[in-house]
């Protein structure tokens, strides 16, 4: 389906009613369950999150508990809006975050199943909100470069090959949303880690920590309890930023080279 | 990083799978080449398996091959144990599953079923060893009569053993199913093994992809034709 909807590309505006089957869970210690809700009179122009806002307003005014979900930028750049919608991270549209998904993707009367990311490394905090600090610890382990302080250096002082700059930029588009982990049958974080490693490995600025970065980030990834990659490609298929699975092969190369060539 | 980490991290375990898997692929090339000699009989009915029996006898007396046989067993052993470990460890990383699954929308069914396809292959292998490897090495059941080969050597009549084994339909069917599992296992495994070893350039990946598809179809097909040809009387 295209972002313009199924029919002809023109966005016909209408209001629809949908049934929601949403995961409700008090906290990480308790068992959760599905609850069913009706969202009535929802404009097809609304985003998926706006639909939840409307529903939550209603729940609050009825004295019921609203549904907890993560969100921040609502423009597809922060990566917080994690929702597993009808069996697909970020819902049915290709290369689209949940906040950019619009209600015209759904039919009047449809039942929509909404689940949190499921992975041991991403425990549920509440309802649809999961704890993704594991990603932050992976970044802390190696997703940085060291620079001297002082005056800002001229942006063009170090020449960079154009193809490498482009590939690095494409990898840097990763917003750390975790959809790749959610989609992978192994709950593997390899697409995320490979994007971060590729981004820096292709630039001269990333060269000093190139080897330790690959080793340390993978070690942290394993410590956090993510699974191993078996190259199924589910991550690439659902990634809202179209990070290529070829980056995983590149990470494998970086890791193997670092492992073989490290001094210790 | 020390050596053991290089092979025990999540990537390291996959490197082990990849290296052993590629080694098993080279074994398949040799195996299909040697056994393919049975088809000489389809072209020249006076052959009666002589070409294949000569090839088998050469393999049995060649010292390099006899040493490689141990390496092959080690390769199978490591690939199988590591494969099962990887499969179960990865399954354990999501204690609670989804209500609605992504399924084929994100990946091919066979890429998600490597553990299952491998287990079917393992069961097939046990039967296969029972049928041919154990008689040829130890019991000599069904090949008691030595055969004089056209090159002057005396060998086991493995051709007749194949013919006798593949006279039963259920065995033929199990072998064909084994070959189908192998085809799907390789359809994912062949290219995946290269990715695991770090091949990331598009032009090479495209080449390996095409090679992998060709290999996964042709090699299992030739293997499957062996029991079928005996049963259908095309050879023997
Ligand atoms: C002739 C027999 C076999 C050949 C040629 C073969 C080949 C391969 C190859 C090339 C790979 C890909 C490695 C990678 O992705 O890096 C692989 C993976 C695998 N194999 Fe085998 N294999 C064989 C038998 C078996 C058997 C008997 C098992 C039994 C359990 C098995 C289980 C697995 C598993 C679980 C994987 C990992 C799946 C994945 O990473 O996607 N294989 N195999
Ligand atoms: S690789 Fe894609 S799916 Fe994975 S965290 Fe980055 S943006 Fe999200
Ligand atoms: S809320 Fe920021 S990407 Fe969706």
Image: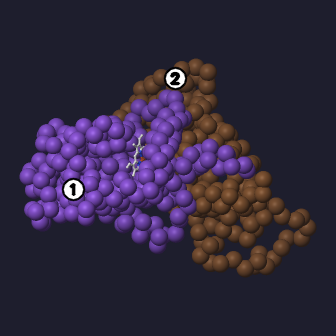
Chain colours: A brown, B purple
Q: Residue at image x 62%, y 67%?
A: A169
Percent position (x, y) of residue B168? Answer: 13, 39
Total count of labels: 2
Query: Could one spot residue B200 in this view of the protein?
Result: yes
Residue where numbered disc 1 is placed: B148
Chain letter of the residue beneath label 2 in the structure image: A
The N terminus of chain A lies in which quarter of the figure? bottom left
Viewer-nearest residue: A46 or A32: A32
Query: Could one spot residue A179 in this view of the protein?
Result: no
Q: Is residue A42 above or below residue B92?
A: below
Percent position (x, y) of residue B58? Answer: 34, 59
Chain letter of the residue beneath label 1 in the structure image: B
Percent position (x, y) of residue B90? Answer: 51, 38
Q: Is residue B94 left or right of residue B40?
A: right
> Does dot 2 land on a helix, a strand or a loop?
loop
Viewer-nearest residue: B40 or B60: B60
Distance from label 1 to label 2 (Cα)? 74 Å
Q: Residue A66 occupies which quadrant of the picture?
A: top right
Q: Residue at image x 56%, y 46%?
A: B13
Residue where numbered disc 2 is placed: A32
């Amino acid at each position: 389906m295209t972002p313009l909807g199924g029919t002809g590309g023109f966005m016909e505006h209408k209001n629809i009613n949908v049934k929601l089957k949403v995961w409700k869970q008090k906290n990480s210690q308790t068992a959760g369950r599905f609850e069913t809700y009706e969202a009535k009179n929802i404009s097809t122009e609304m985003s998926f999150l706006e639909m939840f806002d409307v529903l939550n307003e209603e729940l609050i005014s009825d004295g019921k508990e609203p549904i907890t979900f993560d969100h921040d930028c609502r423009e597809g750049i922060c990566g917080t809006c994690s929702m597993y919608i009808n069996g697909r991270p970020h819902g049915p549209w290709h290369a689209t975050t949940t906040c950019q998904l619009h209600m015209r993707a759904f039919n009047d009367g449809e039942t929509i199943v909404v689940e949190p990311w499921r992975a041991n490394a991403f425990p549920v905090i509440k309802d649809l909100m999961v704890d993704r600090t594991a990603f932050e610890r992976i970044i802390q382990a190696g997703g940085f470069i060291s620079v001297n302080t002082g005056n800002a250096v001229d942006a063009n002082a170090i020449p960079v090959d154009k193809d490498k700059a482009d590939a690095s930029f494409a990898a840097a588009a990763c917003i750390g949303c975790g959809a790749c982990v959610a989609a992978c049958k192994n709950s593997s974080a390899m697409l995320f880690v490979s994007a971060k490693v590729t981004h820096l490995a292709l630039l001269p600025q990333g060269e000093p920590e190139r080897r330790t970065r690959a080793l340390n980030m993978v070690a942290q990834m394993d410590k956090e309890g993510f699974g191993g990659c078996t190259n199924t490609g589910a991550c690439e298929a659902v990634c809202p930023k179209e990070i290529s699975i070829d980056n995983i092969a590149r990470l494998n190369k970086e890791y193997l080279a670092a492992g073989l060539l490290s001094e210790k | 990083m020390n050596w053991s980490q290089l092979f025990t991290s999540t990537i390291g375990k996959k490197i082990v799978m990849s290296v052993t898997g590629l080694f098993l692929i080279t074994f398949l090339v040799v195996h299909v080449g040697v056994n393919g000699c049975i088809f000489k009989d389809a072209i020249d009915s006076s052959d009666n398996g002589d070409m294949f029996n000569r090839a088998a006898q050469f393999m049995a007396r060649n010292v390099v091959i006899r040493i490689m046989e141990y390496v092959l067993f080690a390769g199978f052993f490591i690939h199988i144990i590591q494969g099962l470990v990887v499969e179960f460890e990865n399954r354990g990383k999501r204690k609670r599953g989804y209500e609605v699954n992504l399924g084929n929308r994100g990946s091919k069914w066979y890429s998600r079923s490597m553990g299952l396809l491998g287990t079917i292959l393992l069961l097939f292998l046990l039967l296969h060893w029972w049928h041919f490897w154990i008689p040829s090495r130890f019991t000599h059941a069904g090949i008691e009569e030595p055969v004089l080969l056209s090159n002057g050597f005396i060998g086991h009549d493995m051709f007749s053993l194949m013919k006798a084994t593949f006279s039963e339909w259920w065995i033929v069917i199990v072998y064909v199913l084994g070959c189908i599992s192998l085809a799907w296992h390789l359809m994912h495994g062949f290219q995946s093994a290269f990715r695991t070893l770090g091949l990331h350039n598009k032009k090479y990946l495209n080449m390996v992809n095409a090679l992998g598809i060709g290999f996964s179809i042709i090699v299992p097909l030739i293997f499957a034709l062996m029991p079928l040809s005996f049963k259908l009387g095309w050879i023997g």
